[in-house]
Image (spheres, rainbow, N blue to C red):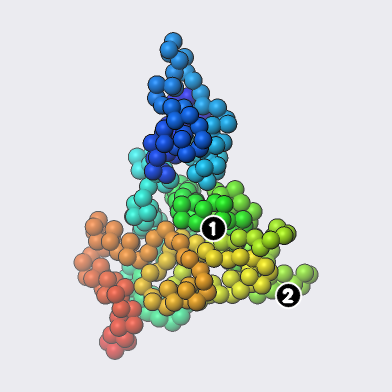
């Protein structure tokens, strides 16, 4: 609801999210430093004074925030606060909680999961499951927009690209939050019609700055197909975003470095394990086994095979 109180609350929250006081944000936006002072929010007679649309436009421009994000600061009244006001480690902790509570991550050391690679693992993640949980999805995508705006800059993203198939819904969610065009990239060209590997419309002219969005990353090897296709189409690709990064394979860092990609993520297995230990989501034996796996996946798998 657009009340006088909530509009000013959103301005205060936006300033806090970017490390400013309200007067500091006003100054940064080229406004009179006293524009957002609490004493200016009512007339001497007590009549409410509303911020101008020009003022709001200027603070959105200087922070890189979108109108949707500004409105979310008005609407977001839960105790945890909006994602835009949270630190990176707080976002990681809340993401871990959501993953555990929605059973999108599972621990089972006694009867390990078999991953697509054939590797045995006491942990399993299914980010596709997350898209069905509305409130949780809202937080995660607000957090994604916050991280990308802070770490990449909205002005450095022209187009959001979802990777087939699990990256497509997340690409759409992120593009909506950032108010950017969206495309998606196939693993291989379509076998009919235009034979397209990239679906959607790429802007003409200079190289568009494209960020690749997927659901998760293990070692990052599969990203190369999408990144090569985008670069072959004339795109500049320097960043990728995933909801979840395994964070346990050295090959992941190496692959990203070789491809010239900066990876951004909401959480890793270490974040999930830390919360699971703090709040006793699983028994001590399971937690110990999972920690051993995360520290040395190959050793854990070898020991399991030997047994």
Q: Residue furthest top?
A: 45
* Nearest to the observer: residue 117 or residue 156: 156
The quarter of the image holding the C terminus is bottom left
Tell me the crowding category of disc 2: few under 14, some 14 to 19, or many 20 or more residues within 10 angstroms, Cα based: few
Q: Find disc 1 in the rendering and name its residue.
A: 170
Secondary structure beneath dot 1 equals helix
Q: Position of residue 171 (x, y in %)?
A: 57, 58
Residue drawn at x 29%, y 75% is 295
Secondary structure beneath dot 2 equals loop
Residue 164 can be seen, yes or no: yes
Residue drawn at x 29%, y 58% is 275
- Relative height, residue 77 to residue 2 (above, below): below
* Nearest to the observer: residue 213 or residue 292: 213
- Relative height, residue 272 to residue 193 (above, below): above
Task: Please state if 11 lies on the left or on the right of 181 as rendered.
Answer: left
Residue drawn at x 50%, y 77% is 258
* Nearest to the observer: residue 193 or residue 226: 226
Q: Position of residue 34 (x, y in %)?
A: 43, 27
Q: Position of residue 226 (x, y in %)?
A: 59, 71
Q: Find disc 2 in the rendering and name its residue.
A: 191
């Amino acid at each position: 609801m657009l009340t006088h109180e909530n509009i000013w609350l959103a301005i205060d929250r936006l300033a806090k999210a970017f490390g400013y006081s309200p007067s500091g944000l006003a100054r940064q936006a080229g406004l009179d430093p006293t524009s957002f002072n609490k004493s200016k929010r009512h007339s001497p007679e007590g009549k409410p004074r509303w911020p101008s649309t020009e003022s709001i436009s200027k603070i959105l421009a200087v922070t890189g925030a979108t109108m949707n994000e500004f409105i979310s600061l008005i609407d977001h009244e839960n105790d945890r606060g909006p994602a835009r006001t949270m630190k990176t480690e707080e976002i990681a902790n809340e993401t871990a909680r959501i993953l555990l509570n929605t059973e999108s991550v599972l621990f089972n050391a006694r009867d390990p999961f078999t991953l697509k690679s054939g590797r045995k693992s006491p942990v399993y993640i299914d980010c596709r499951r997350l898209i069905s949980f509305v409130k949780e999805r809202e937080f995660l995508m607000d957090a994604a927009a916050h991280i990308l705006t802070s770490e990449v800059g909205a002005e450095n993203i022209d187009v959001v690209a979802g990777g087939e198939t699990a990256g497509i819904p997340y690409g759409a969610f992120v593009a909506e939050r950032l108010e950017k065009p969206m495309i998606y990239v196939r693993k291989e060209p379509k076998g009919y019609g235009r034979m397209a590997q990239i679906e959607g419309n790429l802007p003409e002219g200079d190289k568009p700055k494209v960020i690749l969005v997927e659901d998760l990353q293990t070692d990052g090897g599969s990203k190369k197909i999408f990144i090569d296709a985008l670069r072959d189409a004339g795109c500049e690709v320097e960043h990728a975003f995933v909801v979840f990064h395994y964070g346990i394979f050295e090959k992941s860092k190496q692959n990203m470095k070789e491809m010239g990609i900066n990876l951004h993520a909401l959480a890793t297995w270490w974040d999930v394990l830390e919360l699971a230990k703090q709040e006793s989501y699983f028994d001590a034996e399971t937690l110990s086994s999972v920690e051993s796996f995360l520290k040395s996946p190959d050793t854990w798998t070898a020991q399991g095979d030997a047994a």
